[in-house]
Image: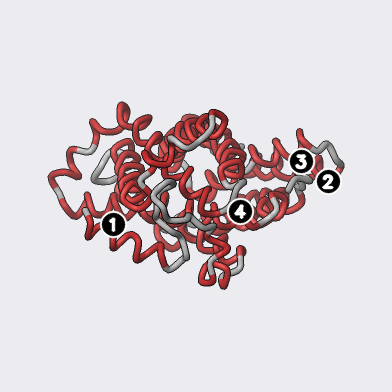
């Protein structure tokens, strides 16, 4: 265990993040206050997150041929939870949280589990780029409800029109897939809200909350997913692939999200999110050979425009 922790600390220590638990006598400093972490602009962390956010799920789709998607979801969350446990030891940190922060961690963990499962159920039936575009209806809708401006109204219209372009031709044939895509959309909006709340005190504090939330996510997903990991246990290659999906999907992007959220205004972060549907489509083309039709490209572009136009007015 000590050697594993050294490896994890070596990886994340280069970002200037301390793995010392609260009360251990070592001061936990904010990641963005460390020289090495501060050397990277917040936008760079976002770009890294954007790439890995959909690279991992694209590889997960390939793994669905060998391991049930619920088993892949469990492997993703379990591997991420293990890495965070070795790195941050969240059980030491949770005791220092106040009641509100504990509720945030608990809610974020449940949302992470539900979001990942519904996302996998969607991308097993619907192209990755389409699911990625649909999930942005939630954040845009929240922004429009919170700041009822003409700009946000235009953003919502663009996003709804884009989703219509993406779904209206195929909705009858893939109704279940689209249903899960809209469920994932709702949980993605909650993830953005809870993620910003977790990151409110800075990058390092946000990572510690995230590590605790990932343990909660593992508890939440285990009843529905652990029964489907049998094939991976019999084939080490598939097991390692599941761990790789977890690192690419739930460690690198979520950690980078916390660094970015801690240093960017929420409105700026939301604007940058507009590139994610395009990132998902690129990953779908490169890894899954999912070539979007002209109408699907138009729909994705409309959603991207909606995300780019919307503004919530919050920090």
Mark 4 and 3 residues: CB-CB less than 8 Å, in contact?
no
Mark 4 and 2 residues: CB-CB less than 8 Å, in contact?
no
Q: Residues within 10 Å of mark 4 (few under 14, many from 20)?
A: many
Please name the residue shown 61% across and 63% down the image.
Answer: 42
Q: CA distance from mark 4 to mark 2?
A: 25 Å
The residue nearer to you, when weighing 240 against 199, is: 199
Q: Residue furthest front?
A: 25
Left or right: 169 with respect to 229? right
Mark 1 and 3 residues: CB-CB less than 8 Å, in contact?
no
Label 4 vs 3, first from the N-terminus: 3
The residue at which mark 3 appears reads as 157
Q: Position of residue 88 (x, y in %)?
A: 38, 50
Left or right: 228 with respect to 171? left
Label 1 vs 3, first from the N-terminus: 1
Label 4 vs 2, first from the N-terminus: 2
Q: Nearer the viewer, mark 1 or mark 2?
A: 1
* Numbered mark located on residue 151 in the image: 2
Q: Nearer the viewer, mark 1 or mark 3?
A: 1
The residue at which mark 1 appears reads as 5
Q: Position of residue 142 (x, y in %)?
A: 70, 36
**Whether residue 29 is situated above or below residue 44 in the rendered picture:** above
Residue 120, picture quadrant:
top left
Please name the residue shown 70% across and 53% down the image.
Answer: 265
Residue 67, picture quadrant:
top left
**Whether residue 310 is situated above or below residue 180 in the rendered picture:** below
* Numbered mark located on residue 262 in the image: 4
- Label total for image: 4
Please name the residue shown 60% across and 41% down the image.
Answer: 197
Please name the residue shown 51% across and 63% down the image.
Answer: 48
**Whether residue 95 is situated above or below residue 309 in the rendered picture:** above
Mark 2 and 3 residues: CB-CB less than 8 Å, in contact?
no
């Amino acid at each position: 265990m000590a050697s594993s922790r050294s490896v994890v600390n070596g990886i994340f220590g280069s970002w200037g993040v301390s793995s010392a638990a609260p009360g251990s006598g070592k001061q936990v400093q904010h990641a963005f206050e460390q020289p090495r972490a501060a050397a990277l602009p917040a936008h760079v962390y976002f770009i890294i997150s954007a790439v890995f956010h959909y690279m991992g799920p694209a590889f997960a789709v390939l793994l669905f041929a060998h391991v049930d998607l619920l088993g892949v979801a469990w492997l993703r969350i379990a591997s991420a939870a293990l890495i965070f446990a070795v790195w941050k030891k969240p059980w030491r940190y949770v005791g220092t949280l106040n009641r509100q922060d504990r509720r945030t961690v608990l809610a974020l963990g449940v949302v992470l589990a539900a979001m990942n499962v519904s996302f996998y159920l969607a991308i097993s039936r619907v192209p990755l780029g389409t699911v990625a575009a649909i999930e942005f209806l939630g954040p845009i809708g929240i922004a429009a409800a919170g700041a009822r401006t003409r700009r946000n109204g235009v953003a919502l219209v663009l996003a709804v029109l884009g989703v219509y372009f993406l779904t209206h031709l195929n909705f009858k044939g893939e109704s279940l897939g689209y249903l899960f895509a809209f469920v994932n959309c709702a949980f993605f909006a909650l993830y953005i809200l809870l993620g910003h709340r977790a990151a409110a005190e800075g990058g390092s504090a946000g990572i510690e909350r995230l590590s605790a939330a990932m343990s909660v996510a593992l508890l939440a997903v285990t009843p529905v997913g652990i029964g489907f990991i049998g094939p991976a246990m019999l084939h080490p290659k598939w097991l390692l692939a599941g761990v790789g999906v977890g690192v690419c999907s739930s460690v690198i992007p979520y950690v980078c999200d916390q660094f970015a959220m801690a240093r960017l205004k929420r409105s700026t972060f939301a604007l940058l999110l507009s590139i994610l549907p395009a990132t998902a489509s690129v990953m779908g083309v490169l890894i899954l050979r999912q070539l979007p039709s002209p109408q699907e490209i138009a729909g994705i572009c409309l959603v991207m425009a909606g995300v780019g136009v919307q503004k919530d007015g919050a920090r």
